[in-house]
Image (tube, helix red, strand yellow):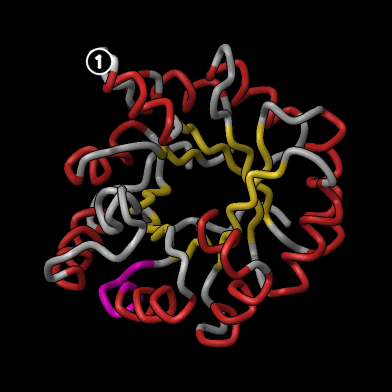
């Protein structure tokens, strides 16, 4: 499956929740607010597995559903299972073996799902992104991990951000890029300016980063404002 046609910047909400009912409620709220894609976040997949993806597909037919598997091995089977459960996209890690990435890409072609390659913890994030594209991934996720960010900050260091090298990653690949990892609201909205048309909203923007529950406050109004701000931006010329 090639990358879905992108006619404007895309807003994706990461449902990093552990309860399927809360995930469905948050997804419905997000779609009302203008979110384009739903993500079955890793916590949801760990808690609910295929049932969570099936529930999202059943409740929201026609809406893209990203299964954030963070696949490291057994790539073909994992991608096949999620595709049959209703996922339209799956995630494989750049730190996996090349054969695993190739297996996920093959499953993507066989079952009609998009493959998103995640460059988290690559020694060279730019080279990792290019490697994923060369192996056939349809998208690149430029990702600074949750534990990495918190650990560096706790030790008194400057918290790393995916924006640090986002322009370099975008310049290195031809496939659409999304930036993930501790972005502020303002930073997330600006991602299309960096050439990354896929804007991901999750912890801490919409999910409480410590409890993995839906954040307090008027989430729907906040999401609507974010979606409007993202959607009115011009599409990066290379997207």
Residue at the image position 68 percent from the left and 30 percent from the top: 132
- Secondary structure beneath label 1: loop
Q: Position of residue 232 (x, y in %)?
A: 23, 56
Left/right of residue 189 with respect to residue 124 in the rendered view: left
Report the residue at 40% width, 56% height from top.
Answer: 10
Percent coordinates x, y for residue 21 in the rendering: 44, 81
Name the image quarter holding residue 83: bottom right
In the rendered structure, the answer to whether residue 107 lies left or right of residue 181 reads right
Residue marked by disc 1: 158
Image quadrant in which you'd find residue 35: bottom left
| Residue 78 x, y percent position in the rendering | 78, 55
Q: Is residue 31 magenta?
A: yes
- Residue count near mark 1 (Cα–Cα under 10 Å), binned few <14, some 14–19, many ≥20: few
Quarter of the image with the N terminus is bottom right
* Above or below 119: residue 110: below
Q: Give the image location of residue 218, x and y in percent.
A: 13, 71
Residue lying at 57% horizontally and 37% vertically, measured from the top left: 140
Q: Nearer the viewer, residue 70 or 111?
A: 70
Magenta stretch in the rendered image: 30-35
Does the magenta-highlighted stretch encompass residue 224?
no
Instruction: Report the residue at 24% width, 46% height from top.
Output: 189
């Amino acid at each position: 499956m090639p990358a879905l046609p992108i006619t404007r910047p895309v807003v994706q909400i990461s449902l990093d929740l552990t309860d399927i009912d809360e995930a469905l409620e948050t997804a419905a709220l997000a779609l009302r607010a203008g979110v384009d894609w739903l993500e079955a976040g890793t916590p949801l997949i760990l808690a609910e597995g295929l049932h969570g993806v099936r529930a999202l597909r059943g409740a929201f037919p026609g809406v893209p559903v990203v299964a954030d598997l963070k696949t490291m091995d057994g790539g073909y089977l994992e991608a096949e299972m999620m595709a049959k459960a209703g996922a339209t996209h799956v995630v494989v890690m750049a730190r996996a073996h090349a054969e695993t990435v190739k297996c996920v890409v093959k499953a993507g072609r066989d079952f009609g799902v998009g493959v998103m390659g995640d460059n988290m913890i690559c020694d060279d994030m730019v080279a990792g992104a290019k490697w994923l594209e060369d192996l056939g991934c349809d998208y690149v996720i430029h990702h600074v991990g949750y534990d990495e960010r918190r650990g560096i900050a706790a030790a008194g260091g400057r918290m790393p951000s995916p924006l640090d090298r986002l322009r370099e990653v975008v310049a290195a690949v031809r496939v659409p890029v999304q930036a993930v990892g501790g972005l502020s609201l303002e930073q997330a909205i600006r991602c299309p300016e960096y050439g990354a048309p896929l804007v991901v909203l999750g912890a801490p923007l919409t999910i409480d980063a410590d409890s993995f529950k839906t954040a307090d406050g008027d989430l729907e109004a906040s999401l609507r404002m974010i979606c409007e701000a993202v959607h009115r931006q011009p599409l990066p010329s290379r997207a």
